[in-house]
Amino acid sequence: MTWTTVYNGSFTRFRCFFPENQAPFHYHHAQEACGGLAILGMQLLQHNRRAASLSCGTAIAAIAANGAATTREAYGLADIQVKIEMLARAAEALGVADVATAYREMIQRPPQISDADWPFFMEAREARTRQLDRRLREMERYPRGLRDDPVPLLQRILEQKQRQGAEAGEHQ
């Protein structure tokens, strides 16, 4: 089962924004758009708006697939796909494991990437995920992110979960 079937064809809603015969917009614009979508998706999760939040993930996945179709840059795809991982981590922290699973199902090999090339893309995504983990650990030293940077919001959500877990432990 793929994420396009899970969401009742919601991917088709985004095809009109990403026509196959059109080159994708510049990498930095894609990063900014995906960062904004990740922030919006996390905010929607905080307000228990799961379907709308999943649509943000679907849009990020569509941007990733469209960009991979034309640029074939491993780190460019990894940078975008790690935004979906951020949404998954936020969903886990907020106690919606099914949504986290749905997000992770969106992180797929675009059909334009060959099986032979895929290990390079996986390595790039693993490197970006390690960098995300490092940024989350270092947020105390560098608390402000750039505009449309979803990492500070993810850090706040994760800290909130830790505080709630600590408080629950104290009450037992």
Image (cartoon, rainbow, N blue to C red):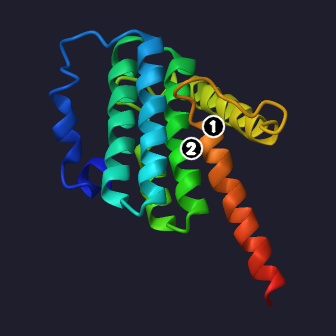
Residue beneath the point at 43% across and 46% down: 41
Q: How many tags in the picture?
A: 2
For disc 2, the marked residue is 86
Alpha carbon distance from label 2 to label 1:
8 Å
Are there few (<14), some (14-19), or many (20+) residues within 10 Å of tag 1? many
Q: Is residue 113 left or right of residue 116?
A: left
Quick one: label 2 or label 1, which is nearer the N terminus? 2
**Can you say which quadrant of the picture contains the C terminus?**
bottom right
Camera-nearest residue between 74 and 145: 145
Considering the numbered disc 2 on the image, is that residue within a helix, a strand or a loop? helix
The amino acid type found where label 1 is placed reads Val
Residue beneath the point at 84% across and 33% down: 141
Q: Is residue 110 left or right of residue 7?
A: right
| Residue 111, x across and y down, in percent | 34, 30
Camera-side mark, 2 or 1: 1
| Residue 65, x across and y down, in percent | 36, 28
**Residue 142 appearing in the image:** yes
Considering the numbered disc 1 on the image, is that residue within a helix, a strand or a loop? helix
Camera-nearest residue between 75 and 84: 84
For disc 1, the marked residue is 151
| Residue 98, x across and y down, in percent | 45, 66
Q: Residue furthest bottom?
A: 172
Camera-nearest residue between 118 and 92: 92
Labels 2 and 1 touching (C-beta < 8 A): yes
The amino acid type found where label 2 is placed reads Met
Camera-nearest residue between 73 and 85: 85
Residue beneath the point at 52% across and 58% down: 91
**Can you say which quadrant of the picture contains the N terminus?**
bottom left
